[in-house]
Image: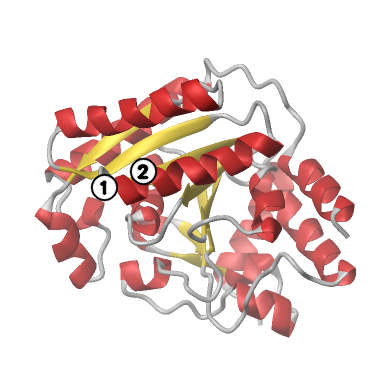
Amino acid sequence: MENDQAKSLRERLKTLRTQAKSIAVMSGKGGVGKSNFSLNFSLALQNAQKRVLLFDLDIGMGNIDILIGESSRLTIVDFFNKNVSLTDIITTGPNNLDYISGGTGLGTIFRLSEEIFQRFIQELEPLFNAYDFVIFDMGAGISEDSLRFILCVDEIIVITTPEPTSMTDAYAAIKHICVNHETMPFSIVVNRAFNRKIGDFTFNRLAQTMKQFLKREVTLLGTIPDDSTIMKAVIDQKPFLMYQPNCHASKAINKIANDFINRQSSIDVEDAKPFIAKLKYFFMKGR
């Protein structure tokens, strides 16, 4: 029997005609707090009255369920292996945030049969009419398969920390994308900064390197402090934004979300081609 959540979403799809902006959240390496950012950023956008779908694409190693202390009834694996619809695998999490769990047991969605991939496209497309933002929490690093997916989004948020290895890996990932997409907008979030000065220094080093070697400008979306509340929230399996709304990290993520929303109206999108259209092109091209 169809669950109430899926039924409600299908009713929304009949009336809504917005076009969600697609955001890929990525990092050059693992362990920099990428998924934790994706979750709390999504919740902050939701608090600002935006409709958000968080899509965990770190297939097989997804952390969203773990971070919120819930086990999704269905995951993206069920879509591909059990023919379950995308609307049925959307789970409502904390603060009524809609998300799709990455699940386990599936290596990649980027090497599918044409039949399955077409079904994925057909079911994903109407979801973009039901949300303001679709946020893809990507796996760490970039594979040749995932690259085509990343190149289709409207904007990329790169998470780094002040550690030199994290910065180097973030630059390598950005460089890989720039080679294939000359106009992709990037934003940087510096996570685990001991203070604002270190956050600014980290961003400026990365920005200067990009400008010198890639001839590209980049935006600082924000800095998240190295707040002990984050680890406590992770241990208790709750988003830190809800665990302690007034902690330094929560204030930072709210500012990042508000600045992000305010910036959207001023962005000049050179490539206005819809995400789904680009996805069809890149994946059919690669077959």
Q: Nearer the viewer, residue 3 or 114?
A: 114
Quarter of the image where one finds residue 224: top left
**Residue type beneath disc 1:** Glu
Instruction: Give the residue at x 48% y 50%.
Output: 26
Is residue 85 shown left or right of residue 41? right
User: Is mark 2 in CB contact (under 8 Å) with mark 1?
Assistant: yes
Other residues around mark 2 within 10 Å, as few (<14) / some (14–19) / many (≥20): many
Q: Which of 16 and 189 is in front in this view?
A: 189
Pinpoint residue 75: horizontal percent, then vertical percent.
57, 75
Quadrant where the N terminus is found in the figure: bottom right
Quarter of the image where one finds residue 86: bottom right
Q: In the displayed structure, would residue 19 be above or below residue 32?
A: above
Residue where numbered disc 2 is placed: 167
**Under tag 1, what secondary structure?**
loop
Q: Is residue 28 visible?
A: yes
Pinpoint residue 37: horizontal percent, then vertical percent.
35, 50
Quarter of the image where one finds residue 220: top left
Other residues around mark 1 within 10 Å, as few (<14) / some (14–19) / many (≥20): few
Instruction: Give the residue at x 26% y 36%.
Output: 223
Q: In the displayed structure, would residue 177 be above or below residue 205?
A: below
Q: Residue furthest front?
A: 213
Residue where numbered disc 1 is placed: 163
Instruction: Give the residue at x 71% y 84%.
Output: 82
Q: Nearer the viewer, residue 34 or 131?
A: 34
For the residues marked 2 and 1, what is the alpha-carbon distance in whole angstroms?
A: 6 Å
Pinpoint residue 177: horizontal percent, then vertical percent.
62, 41
Is residue 116 shown left or right of residue 171? right
